[in-house]
Image (spheres, rainbow, N blue to C red):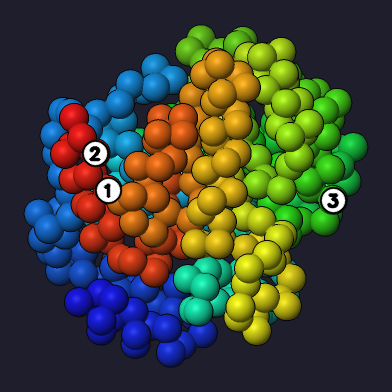
Amino acid sequence: MYKTIIRRIFFTFDPEKIHHFTFSLIRFFHKIGFGSIFRSIYKIENTKLERELFGLKFPNPVGLAAGFDKDAKLYKELSNFGFGFIEIGTVTPKPQPGNDKPRLFRLKEDSAIINRMGFNNGGVEEAVERLKSNTNVLIGGNIGKNKVTPNEEAVNDYIICFEALFDYVDYFVVNVSSPNTPNLRALQEKKPLTDLLQTLQDRNNSKEKRKPILLKIAPDLTDEQLLNIIEIVAVTEIDGVIATNTTISREGISSENKKEMGGLSGKPLTERATEVIRFLSEKSNKAFPIIGVGGIHSAEDALEKLDAGASLVQLYTGFIYEGPALLKEINKAILKRR
């Protein structure tokens, strides 16, 4: 029903407007008692799906990637579709509107999306207020810097977000890989990235109970840069890597919208994201956990990432194109293997 009717209707409207409309629709259905219905349709509860990672117990290995629920407005409702964990953000210290509209584009022929949102969010304190009422959803906090903050002062923005969210998220994700904030990806270079992660890790280790810190990386890194990532993870002793963010590549894209600036996600990223996962896993000798994300549009795509070395997977564009049934398909496929 989703792909044959709902998606066809939704895809006739502006992508960003329909995103907000969908949030309102999901919220409305939950207010009139549909939460239990969604759970009964999409959620699979089975101890064989549980994963122990970073000292956390994930009810299943399929999560929602950052960017969908930036401001933690709908994480409770979204969890009813069967997600094992939900990553909010990217959040920044101060609210910011993001880049000029239009900034979100569908590439229907390629089952892809290009976005140049630019970390639009209401600021970390607004997200914290919403997270205070969380009781049972496993939450990741994806943190970034404000656009106006120069790179040499970026570490302060990450510290502000880290401290504000510390009591309200289960793990952190350091985002230095979005292509939509000017010069942000320069922070992926070895020295600034090591300094940033070490600063956060030092603060983390000073806490009574530390929280897992993960690094989200771009799919556009060279093999040499990926080897640097492995070394940085070892030196700073962070807990893992999320591979990958969106790509600036337009290889193999047929849609006219490929000319739009921004990060590309969806099916065109499937193979490259899996390659990065496999490279990190093999070259590090599985030294750290990897969360695989990028182009997961089927159960087979998810299984490929798990086989390549990912411990968990996340959805975003695949969730938009395939609908919530995709989560159930993935979890059923994982159970069938065990």
The amino acid type found where label 3 is placed reads Asn
Q: Quadrant of residue 335 in the image?
A: top left
Q: Where is residue 135 in the image (x, y as percent from the top left)?
A: 28, 37
Q: Position of residue 215 (x, y in %)?
A: 62, 33
Check disc 1 and report the residue beneath it: 330
At mark 2, the secondary structure is helix
Q: Is residue 76 left or right of residue 192?
A: left
Quadrant of the frame with the N terminus: bottom left
Q: Is residue 11 left or right of residue 202?
A: left
Q: What element carries label 1?
A: helix
Q: Residues within 10 Å of mark 3 (few under 14, many from 20)?
A: some
The residue at the point 44 percent across, 79 percent down is 18
**Towards the viewer: 111 or 52:** 111
> From where the camera sits, is residue 297 visible?
yes
Q: Earlier in the sequence, mark 2 or mark 3?
A: 3
User: 265 or 75: which is nearer to us?
Assistant: 265
Tell me if 130 is positioned left or right of 96 in this view: left
Q: Are marks 1 and 2 in contact (CB under 8 Å)?
A: yes
Of mark 3 and mark 1, the one earlier in the sequence is: 3
Q: Position of residue 276 (x, y in %)?
A: 60, 39
Instruction: Kindly identify the residue that appears in the image at 40 percent across and 67 percent down.
Output: 320
The CA span between labels 2 and 3 is 39 Å
Q: Give the CA separation, mark 1 to mark 2.
A: 6 Å
Q: Which mark is residue 205?
A: none
Tell me which amino acid carries mark 2: Ile
Q: What element carries label 3?
A: loop
**Image height of 305 relative to 287, above or below:** below
Residue 228 placement (x, y as % from top left): 76, 26
Residue wearing tag 2: 334
Q: Name the residue under label 3.
A: 183
Question: What separation in Å lies between label 3 and label 1 (alpha carbons)?
Answer: 36 Å
Question: Looking at this view, is 81 or 270 the one in front?
Answer: 270
